[in-house]
Image: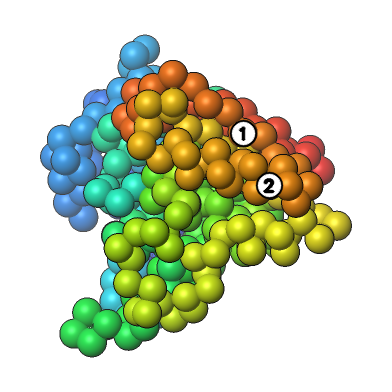
Amino acid sequence: METTRRQQVVSSRNAIEGASISRIRLLSFPCDDAGYTSARMGGAQPADERGKLMSLVAVQFRSDALGKRVGYNVILPDEGEGPFPVLMQLHGLSDDCNAWIQKSNLVRHVEKLPLVVVLPDGGTSAYLNWKDAGRLGRQNYEDLIVTDISNHVRRHLHVTEGPWAIGGLSMGGWGALWLGLKHVDRFASIWAHSSKLDWQASQLQLSMLANPEDVDIEASAQRVATFDRKPVISFDCGVDDELIEENRAFHRHLEAIGLEHHYAEHPGGHTWDYWDDHVQEALVQHARVLGRSQGD
């Protein structure tokens, strides 16, 4: 029964042309012959305390945006037949697509939610498109997220067409806000934690960006404020976080332009304990908004 249900959620491996999908079964699950094991994922076992069986899928495919094979992880819902709405959950600057699995209890938090959670690998890109980086090749990370991975997920997983949700922490919080505000037709719910928002003041080489104006998130917000249909926007930051003033400034800007949003400050700093606590609030919003947007 479990095998049959999972096959309804993720396409048959043999049916996925040009991609490799490996089933990682957490806790007592064996891996398949593609070699993806918990050790390869950094030794992490995002355990359900009750020993409940859960599924994580590691995917590799060729991305046109980067001109090479790339990977992303997927957390599959435990219940329901689908199609499921999708949450794109982005990592921070020093991490990769495994971070939310290894360093938080995200797998457990989404166990009962009707969401497919996609965990892309954004490198250190700030989820922006960059000019051709010579020997590094194409570095179009915005396109990776909103086009390549999104299309791959739609083709091979039992998911809705959208709109979806997007979230993240630190650099990924920035990514969630800027991608969510730029692509309002694709994302109905945004929640960002501890976001790095002032890239103008950072050492980011703006001249290397394909579109340097992309880092002006205040201008993006002002554009969205004029739309009839707006995403649900939330963000938070710890009061001991060095990025708190950037988040406060963005909150003040959204208030000034009249763009409805939810902003919260909580005790804590730039830590996984903080993010693990507050991603649970984000998940409640995403499930509510996506349920409504899908007509449930």
Amino acid at pointer 2: Leu
Q: Please give the name of the residue rendered at 81% of the width and 55% of the height, measured from the top-left corner.
A: 229
- Marks 2 and 1 close (CB-CB < 8 Å): yes
Inspect this view and state whether residue 95 appears.
Answer: yes
Q: Quadrant of residue 295?
A: top right
Instruction: State the SS at label 2.
Output: helix
Q: Please give the name of the residue rendered at 34% of the width and 47% of the height, measured from the top-left corner.
A: 92
Q: Residue 70: x percent and y percent?
A: 31, 66
Q: Which of the two residues, 87 or 84, is positioned nearer the viewer here?
A: 87
Inspect this view and state whether residue 29 appears.
Answer: no
Left or right: 277 with respect to 230? left
Q: Residue 183: x percent and y percent?
A: 64, 63
2 or 1: tag closer to the N-terminus: 2
Q: Residue 118: x percent and y percent?
A: 46, 49
The image shows residue 12, relative to residue 91, as above or below, that is: below
The image shows residue 4, relative to residue 162, as above or below, that is: above
Numbered mark located on residue 87 in the image: none
Q: Quadrant of residue 289?
A: top right
Specify few, some or many for label 2: CA neighbours under 10 Å numbering under 14, 14-19, or 20 or more.
some
Task: Tell me the quadrant of the picture where the C terminus can be found.
Answer: top right
Left or right: 89 with respect to 221? left
Q: Please give the name of the residue rendered at 61% of the width and 33% of the height, measured from the top-left corner.
A: 263
Specify few, some or many for label 1: CA neighbours under 10 Å numbering under 14, 14-19, or 20 or more.
some
The residue at which mark 2 appears reads as 254
- Alpha carbon distance from label 2 to label 1: 10 Å
Q: Please give the name of the residue rendered at 29% of the width and 45% of the height, measured from the top-left corner.
A: 98
Q: Which of the two residues, 37 or 264, is positioned nearer the viewer here?
A: 264
Instruction: State the SS at label 1.
Output: strand
Numbered mark located on residue 263 in the image: 1
Amino acid at pointer 1: Tyr
Q: How many marks?
A: 2
